[in-house]
């Protein structure tokens, strides 16, 4: 049985005096890929930010059975990696240096990067097919290329928990496949990945799915469970249908207009 890598208890988040998350309880198992789905504005990104400790919240968020407040900031940065939507970075930095930022929590103030750090950076750049740009400034890259570099920065961190909000934005289909392969690889080696995806078919490749609506968790279960599929269909007002085709589970737009 998988241990619990990340959990929240009675989690509430208020933004501008508006309650966004309503007393959420959630257990994320170690060594699993969990995807959070739901309509726009349901609280997916807010949940991920709260689990990362990036915004104020009420209730408890625990990682490896310790409240986030009990973690030393450097240790937390070593074990938890975050990638948000529209992440910014210094456009004048080279691609290599941007990815090396993912190794900063593992470095001492005095020693700087060591051979292990350089190996992690090289591996991450090659994993995202970005090695050939390593000497180029980040600002010279396209949106999709930039996203691949930011993903490489996350993978270089060698964290045990990865939280990613729309990580495949701007990526073409082959590089979406690279990201999925990378997720499956780190999970196979014991890491935990929590992602927010708008592509519902891709979300069904995850091990587990958290379905949200109006700031609450409607359902949390296996991506292959029919109850999970029913919950997903419900929060999208029956406008999608989930079907199996050639051994793959697909989320399709229902009654799409043919032109």
Image (tube, helix red, strand yellow):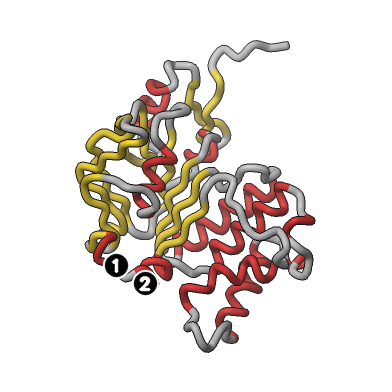
Where residue 177 sits in the image (x, y, percent)? 63, 49
Where residue 42 sits in the image (x, y, percent)? 40, 30
Where residue 3 sits in the image (x, y, percent)? 27, 60
Please indicate, yes or no, whether residue 3 appears anywhere in the rendered image.
no
Q: Are marks 2 and 1 in contact (CB under 8 Å)?
A: yes
Task: Point out which mark residue 203 bears.
Answer: none
Q: Residues within 10 Å of mark 1 (few under 14, many from 20)?
A: few
Badge 2 element? helix
Residue 96 left/right relative to 210 = right
Viewer-proximal residue among 17 and 179: 17
Viewer-proximal residue among 112 and 142: 112
* Residue furthest front in the image: 16
Residue at 26%, 33% (x, y): give it.
22
Image quarter of the C terminus: top right
Does 159 sit above or below residue 89?
A: below
Q: Residues within 10 Å of mark 2 (few under 14, many from 20)?
A: few
Does 37 sit above or below residue 257?
A: below
Badge 1 element? loop
Image quarter of the N terminus: bottom left
Residue that label 1 marks: 71
Viewer-proximal residue among 84 and 186: 84
User: Alpha carbon of mark 2 to alpha carbon of mark 1: how far?
Assistant: 7 Å
User: Quadrant of residue 26 in the image?
Assistant: top left
Task: Point out which mark residue 75 bears.
Answer: 2
Residue at 42%, 67% (x, y): give it.
77
Residue at 33%, 31% (x, y): give it.
215
Where residue 129 sits in the image (x, y, percent)? 71, 61
Please indicate, yes or no, whether residue 91 appears anywhere in the rendered image.
yes
Viewer-proximal residue among 224 and 113: 113
Residue at 64%, 66% (x, y): give it.
98
Q: How many marks?
A: 2
């Amino acid at each position: 049985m998988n241990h619990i890598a990340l959990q929240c208890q009675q989690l509430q988040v208020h933004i501008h005096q508006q309650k966004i998350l309503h007393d959420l309880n959630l257990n994320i198992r170690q060594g699993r890929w969990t995807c959070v789905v739901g309509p726009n504005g349901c609280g997916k990104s807010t949940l991920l930010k709260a689990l990362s400790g990036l915004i104020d919240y009420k209730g408890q968020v625990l990682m490896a059975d310790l409240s986030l407040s009990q973690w030393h900031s450097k240790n937390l940065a070593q074990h938890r990696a975050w990638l948000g939507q529209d992440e910014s970075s210094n456009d004048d930095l080279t691609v290599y240096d941007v990815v090396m930022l993912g190794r900063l929590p593992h470095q001492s103030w005095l020693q700087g990067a060591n051979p292990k750090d350089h190996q992690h950076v090289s591996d991450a750049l090659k994993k995202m097919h970005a090695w050939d740009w390593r000497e180029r400034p980040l600002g010279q890259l396209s949106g999709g290329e930039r996203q691949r570099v930011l993903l490489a920065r996350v993978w270089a961190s060698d964290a045990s928990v990865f939280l990613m909000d729309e990580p495949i934005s701007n990526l073409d289909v082959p590089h979406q496949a690279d990201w999925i392969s990378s997720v499956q690889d780190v999970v196979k080696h014991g890491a935990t990945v929590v992602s927010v995806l708008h592509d519902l078919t891709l979300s069904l490749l995850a091990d587990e799915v958290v379905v949200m609506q109006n700031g609450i968790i409607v359902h949390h279960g296996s991506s292959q469970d029919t109850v999970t599929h029913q919950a997903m269909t419900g929060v999208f007002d029956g406008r999608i249908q989930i079907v199996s085709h050639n051994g793959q589970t697909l989320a399709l737009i229902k009654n799409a207009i043919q032109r």
